[in-house]
Amino acid sequence: MRFALLFVAVMIGNIFGCGRQDEITRYSIEVPLGPSDVKLAVADRVPNAESSATPTRMLAAIFPQGEKTWFFKLNGPDEAVAKQEDLFNALIESVRFTDELPQPSWDLPEGWQQQGASGMRFATIEIEDGDQMLEVTVIPLQTMGEIDEYVLSNVNRWRDQLGLAPVAAIKAGDNDDASTSVRQFKGTDSTLVTLVNLVGRGKGSDVLSAGFDMARHPPIAGQPPVAPAGPPDKNPTFTYTTPDGWSVTGASGMRQAAFEVIDGKQKVEITVISLSQSGGERLANVNRWRNQIQLTDTTAQQLAQDLQKIPMGSVTGDYVELVGPADASPRQAILGVLTDVADSTWFFKLMGDAELAERERERFEVFVQSVTFPLNQEGADNE
């Protein structure tokens, strides 16, 4: 009997203790990628429990491709990775997608060795640097929600892994805190690429990293699905009344709830997202919304005049209405409400065809005013 128990214990240890730990094994709940000055509003960060005394550098690139987004990443000791930066950039600039193949191809830098698929990895590229081996991993994941929010959540997740403090907003190409560089460019096939260069003192690993929850990510081919901790309606964080005519598309990724309205060729989408208050700065988020519908940035003074107050149970929301330029095709609009509850900021957003958005404005306002936050009403949020 003891032998049987010991054998089982050894087998369990072998199953869970061995083998390569693949990239991006946990995922956070939810730029359109816009011009080079698009702002990335960065979400919450949980302090990294495991930090390294040696500076770590991460080079990464994000390629949105419809339902899939491709991630290229190289991380390791700062000095070693910095020596490979030019070659990594050359690799990224050579990446191309074609209609014939639903996957990327690229030009491999001299001396780099490409390995085949493994687990979640589409490919692993090995780089020998003296007595150590570096790796570039290539991983496709299903695109979750709006692409701009999906990209920024991953940028923020990487910052957390390197022990970097969150920022309320950054501009692509800026280097405000000397820890990061983000730039965007069009690849060989006009794909808009986000290229990231981060330096910190975390390990840069996705293993059990804050902000990546596989329970909220769709099952990936070849990987067993991960069961969520419990049914989502067991302890609801908010309640609401769905207006007539709105079709429920369901919560996914960062979205706590989502709906759509379709009238012929016109469509609007309504989403509800919750982030830490560190990502809820009003001006940065409203300017991000403005960029999405081809409007220029506004100022803090003008925004103070444009924001309206809207009641939401025991809290009050900040409400803004944005309509794209008259000559835009298609002309779009955004109705957005931001409200702070405890340590979170909630985003209620209607976006789509400007004419249909105007027709749905009253229903959107009624929907927002129907929202209640049970925890807040019970006073737990004020402790």
Image (tube, helix red, strand yellow):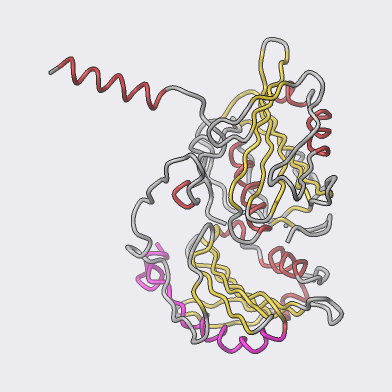
Pick whichever, 121 or 337, lies toward us.
121
Residue 352 in picture, x, y percent from top left? 68, 76
Place residue 86 in its image quadrant: top right
Q: Nearer the viewer, residue 382 or 365?
A: 365
- Lateral position of residue 321 relative to residue 211, left or right: right
Is residue 16 placed above or below 36 in the rendered structure? above
Total label count? 0
Q: Quadrant of residue 60?
A: top right
Asked if the magenta segment contains residue 348, the reply would be no
Q: Residue at x 51, y 25 (%)?
A: 20
Residue 200 in percent (x, y) is at 67, 33
71 shown above or below 21? below
Residue at 42% x, 70% y is: 238
Q: Magenta segment, which residues?
A: 355-383
Residue at the image position 69 percent from the left and 80 percent from the top: 265
Q: Is residue 368 magenta?
A: yes
The percent coordinates of residue 339 (x first, y second) are 55, 71
Residue at 66 percent across and 14 percent down: it is: 132
Q: Quadrant of the N terminus?
A: top left
Quadrant of the rendering where the C terminus is positioned: bottom left
